[in-house]
Image (cartoon, helix red, strand yellow):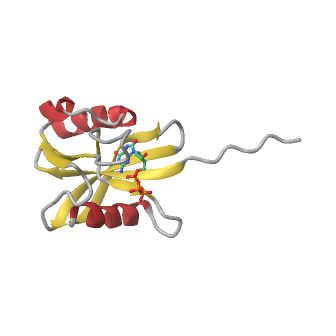
Amino acid sequence: MNEPRPEPPQVVVGAAIRAGHRVLAAARAYPPELAGLWEFPGGKVEPDETEAEALIRECREELGVTIAVGERVGGDLSTGGGRYLLRVYFADLTEGEPHAKEHAELRWLAPAELDSVPWLPGNRPAVEALRELLRA
Ligand SMILES: Nc1nc2c([nH]c(=O)n2[C@H]2C[C@H](O)[C@@H](COP(=O)(O)OP(=O)(O)OP(=O)(O)O)O2)c(=O)[nH]1
């Protein structure tokens, strides 16, 4: 008998929205075990959409803004105990100002402030990559 195959990880995309040298971070409001930890706005890529489409949809839903998706920040990151593959992209605002429609709080962070919030553990390498890119 064959062992059941493990489910492949689901791709989650995050938007590192920049304004000058600062980037937008968002505190999760739910679920309880993730509440108060910080992330990049975004979410799971649906089967019928591209990663850029998912980012645009999620930023509209979560922040009420329109974004233009830019270049990748760092590589693929395994998160959620291997259930997810996190991919972070730079993004620029093209319409609207971000409001926390689903998050507990939003903050614009300068490179020197990136360690001032408790990130989701899986985001650490992306935050390091971001710091380098923002300083460049
Ligand atoms: N959006 C987002 N999720 C992240 C990041 N880092 C990280 O580990 N995750 C994890 C947290 C969640 O367990 C998982 C899925 O993200 P999500 O809950 O935002 O996805 P979603 O909006 O599509 O979810 P759903 O509640 O609609 O089902 O990815 C990040 O920077 N941004």
Image location of residue 117, percent across then percent down: 20, 34
| Residue most extreme to the front | 32
Looking at the picture, does residue 120 appear above or below residue 56? Answer: above
Query: In the displayed structure, does residue 119 sit left or right of residue 92?
Result: right
Q: Quadrant of residue 111?
A: top left
Tally of numbered tags: 0
Instruction: Residue at 34% x, 48% y: name it.
Output: 30
Q: Quadrant of residue 50?
A: bottom left
Instruction: Residue at 39% x, 63% y: name it.
Output: 54
Query: In the displayed structure, does residue 18 sit left or right of residue 51?
Result: left
Residue 131 visible in the displayed image = yes
Image location of residue 79, percent across then percent down: 46, 38
| Residue most extreme to the right | 1
Instruction: Residue at 39% x, 55% y: name it.
Output: 43
Image location of residue 61, percent across then percent down: 29, 66
Closer to the camera, 15 or 37? 37
Instruction: Residue at 89% x, 41% y: name it.
Output: 1
Query: In the displayed structure, does residue 88 sit left or right of residue 21?
Result: right
Q: Quadrant of residue 136?
A: top left
Residue 22 visible in the displayed image = no
Closer to the camera, 49 or 28? 28
Image location of residue 27, percent across then percent down: 24, 44
